Image (tube, coloured by chain):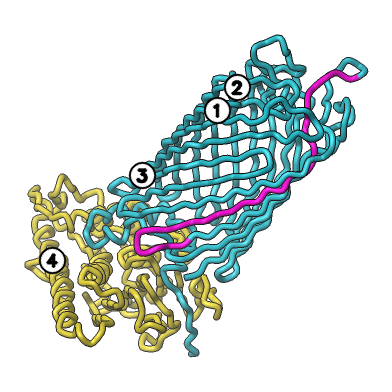
Chain colours: A yellow, B cyan
Amino acid sequence: MGGPASVAIRHDGDSTEEVQALLKTVEQKTVGLEAKYSRYRTDSLISRINSKAGDGEFVAIDTETLSLFNFCAVLHEQSDGLFDPTSGVLREIWDFQLGIVKDLSRLPQLLEKVGWEKVEIRDQQLRLTQEDMALDLGGVVKEYAVDKSIAAIRDAGFSNAIVELAGDVMAIGGRNNDEPWQVGICDPANPSEPLLSIELADAALATSGSYHRFLEWDGERCSHFLNPFTGMPIRDPRSVSVIANNCITAGAIATTACLHSLAESGVWLNTAGLPWLVHDAGVLQGPIAEMGESGGL
Amino acid sequence: MAVTKHRLDSTLLQRLPTDSPLIASLGAAVASLPTYQKAFADAPPAFTEVGLRYSHYSEDSLDKDLLVFGDRERYDIDVTQFWVEAPVGGAWSVAFDVQNDSMSGASPWFVGTNLDGQPGVIMSGASIQDNRVEVGVTTRYFWADGNAGFNVTHSDEDDYEALAFSFDAAWNSDDNSRTWSASASTSNDTVEPVKEAIPVFIDQESLDTQSVYFGVSQILSSTAIMRVGLGYTISDGYLSDPYKLFDQRPSDHKRLAFSTGYRQYFVESDAALKLDYRFYNDDWGTDSHTFELAWQQSLGRHSLTPYLRYYSQSEADFFSVIADTTADFYADDYRLSSYGAVTAGLRGTVALGDWEVEGQLERYDSDQSFGFYGGEAAPGLVDFWRATVGVTLRFD
């Protein structure tokens, strides 16, 4: 999932074995989602779909996958196309792993491979209609894994837990009877130093940002978020955090906010009506930043 | 850098305005996944809410040109409401509400003619003082796809007692984009008019009322929601006004009401436009139309909502400005006449931590010429001011 993972479950001393088994289950579910949806794994469902791009063949998908693609479709429509799971091919030009820009002349050619409208979903089958198209569910799977882990913990009868995957968090119940779970939002300039500490209960906090992945181009720092219409990286790199009742929603709103310009991201975040925070060049904006010591929003 | 601690949890999330259409659309896309089925289930409130509200209603004095006899002063009513709603267990909620109405003033007794032969109002004499107390209890059950509630309400005043039962239910479509709702109610009322300043001609009478309602709301887009509803009501029994000298109404009354509403959210303005329309028709010959326009402007956690309402109704078949007592049914009650009314109001809310303070001021003016139906102008039409203040507290 691209980062550290941690799970904490509060229980009485008699449930230790049960909790250990549950942690194994949670780990298996998370690893299972990675195996299914990672574009880096040649045996994943996503890689299988991508390998058949343009050959006309439909690939059968299960209910879980169909629902995730429905989620992407809704987010694509609601974001006026900015969120697009087919834009990953653009990384053939923008290599954020190495921090370099490769052959920019290929941009028009690659843009022809981008576009959610080129994905065809029929019943529970999917195909990519253009050769060399590629799907990337990196924008939703990690957050979905957090929600799925929490659901497994609840189903096992535990109501106090916190799950974190690479910076996205969901907390239920409390750390103990008097103390809620505490979560930090990182300072992009100093990722190891928390900017805000939040007491979270029965809510998810997802953060998207470019403080881990970026590159320098044309004298500017560019985030790893790519505009699917122009193929260019979004400038004004920033960190966006959103709180929602589940992680997939919080992450979707935060990720899409990063795909907007800095000026338009506030409009998008207000559309969602959820608590949000934008950290840009040392300036904090949003309802989370405006909270006072009284602790109210 | 100093670390600032803030408490931010789902109870605060639930105190925010209800899910935007965008969030509802995203939720609908994954609602079928087991991971989210409990998460998107209908649920009782996560906190207890206690509220207190006071309203003062004051009718304008009757125009002296329209008065034949009596005091020009009309009704003043002070309404105090108190309510508590709390979750019970994981799937229930209980609400208790009590309302006290304190009324004083006079109302039109009948319409006669003044010295110029023009219709004028004879008022009911000395100012009355009356107090009404209404108590209601509602219990509600929540399940994954909806909720259902049962309510009992009892109302008691010097000359009127009513006991009502109602049941309502709402359920969501599989994709959570549509909500169906229905309700049914029955009420038994007893009227025992007070014999004071004016004569009354009944000792005790009763009436029964049953009503049903069906409605549906639909998310249209990330920023728009629409609803429609249809209600039908039947009353049977004593339906005349015992405090009107010339008032003989049919012993049954059937009413149909169609309503629709549209909400459009404007993200950049952080505001919402609200449009509502209601059509009413009954078997006494009355039709009416109500149009309401409101603009809810968010100001951070606070809000300001100016609104405008327009109403027009046609007269009942047996209404006449001066009652025709030779007919089987007759009434000169201005509420059955043809008229139009315009209401302008402003409502504001201020959020202070767990508290919310509200204030509202409304002005209502009516006149036969405001309406688009023909008919004679009833001299007793009322204009009024209403002011409301309230406070609500939510806590775990």
Label 2 sits on residue: B286
Marks 1 and 4 sit apart, C-alpha to C-alpha, by: 57 Å
Marks 1 and 2 sit apart, C-alpha to C-alpha, by: 8 Å
Amino acid marked by disc 1: Tyr
First to last magenta residue range: B86-114
Pointers 1 and 4 within a single chain: no
Query: Left of B113 or right of it: where is B377?
Result: left
Q: Nearer the viewer, residue A270 or B292?
A: B292
Q: Residue furthest top?
A: B326
Marks 3 and 2 sit apart, C-alpha to C-alpha, by: 33 Å
Q: Eyeballing the image, is B13 above or below B160?
A: below
Q: Earlier in the sequence, mark 1 or mark 2?
A: 1
Answer few, some or many: residues within 10 Å of disc 2's Cα (few below 14, many 20 plus, some between 14 and 19): some
Label 4 sits on residue: A36
Q: Quadrant of the N terminus of chain A?
A: bottom left
User: Is there CB contact under 8 Å for labels 1 and 4?
Assistant: no
Label 3 sits on residue: B178
